[in-house]
Amino acid sequence: MNKKFKLKSMNVILILCVITFLSIIPFFWMISTSLKSQEALMAIPIEWIPKNVSFDAFIKVLTKLPFLRSTFNSLLITLSSTILTLLSASFAAFIFAKFEFRFKNVLFVLFLMSMMIPLQVTGIPIFIILTKLGLNNSYLGVILPSVYNVFAIFLLRQFMRKISNELIEAAYMDGASLIHVFFKIIIPISIVPLTTLFVINFMHYWNDYFWPLIILTDPDKVTLPVLLSKLNAQYGTEYNTLMAGSLVSMGPILLVYAFAQKYFIRGVQEGGVK
């Protein structure tokens, strides 16, 4: 029995090694291509490790393109959207988890059903509303739709339901207000799911291409994914430039994950157990 178990474990490890190797290949190819000269791009056979390492693609990305400006735009929009999502989702989840009112369950089911509607369907009415409000071609026009995030509400509501009602009642008996209970008790206890949602939403808004492309028409306000798509049209055959731009744009996501890794893994583990 023990020998059979070890054999199964070896097979699982082997399969995981193969999957990991296949997953790394595109990333390795991206790094390799970004370090090649223009002449080595189409060389046959393929140079997986460049014979002559060149940083010209990175220099071109950082000096001849508005890369820093687009990075600032992406950071501004991503951080604002993520914080707005966490705040609005926390309020909504707290109400759904700890308050009783008529049609609460029906309303929550309607919330969940709206997850099935793709952004491409709701995008047109949201665009018309934002245009009527004069928010077209503005940062606020990109950020404002993030106030509604059903997945974040659902995840936080499931967590907050497990927070002891006696703890909240004790705070009320000590004279705490609703705002005090929310920010001093509910939010600190919910730090693990909030951090998990911060990482997930940061990645989502950082890589979002569809909505900034529709709302932002000013070249000075475009985000990194939109700039990279234009890079593809402008430097269609310069794959080293494209890969260098993609690599640099991954930096903030890796930094956020590195700082929040402990809470993110803990949040995923607790979510899986529950």
Image (cartoon, rainbow, N blue to C red):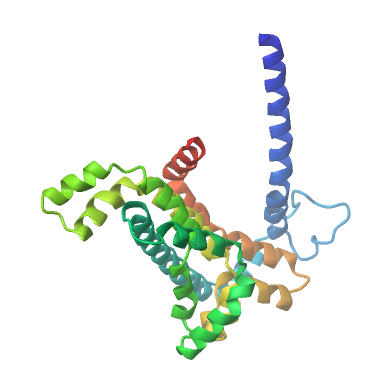
Residue 36 as seen in the image, left or right of residue 104: right
212 and 118: which is toward the camera: 118
Q: Residue most toward the right? A: 44
- Locate residue 79, reporting x and y percent: 43, 65
In the picture, measured across the screen, residue 80 lies left or right of residue 6, that is left
Q: Quadrant of the N terminus?
A: top right
- In the picture, residue 246 is in which quadrant? bottom right
Left or right placement of residue 241 versus residue 188 in this view: right
- Image x and y of residue 73, in percent: 48, 74
Is any part of residue 64 visible from this angle? no
- Give coordinates of residue 88: x percent, y percent: 38, 64
Query: Is 116 or 185 nearer to us in this picture?
Result: 116
Residue 115 shows up from this direction: yes
For image coordinates 60% across by 68% down, the residue present is 59
Tell me which residue sits at (76%, 73%) in the image. Answer: 236
Residue nearer the viewer, 116 or 6: 116
Horizontal and vertical percent position of residue 108: 46, 59
Q: Nearer the viewer, residue 33 or 25?
A: 25
Q: Is residue 162 above or below residue 180?
A: above
Q: Against 16, is 77 above or below?
A: below
- Looking at the rendering, which quadrant does residue 23 occupy? top right
Residue 173 drawn above or below residue 36 = above
Residue beneath the point at 68% across and 62% down? 243
Extreme left residue here? 174
**Which residue lies at the image location 28% right of the left edge and 41% below the top edge?**
164
User: Residue 52 occupies which quadrant of the picture?
Assistant: bottom right
Residue sitting farthest toward the front: 102
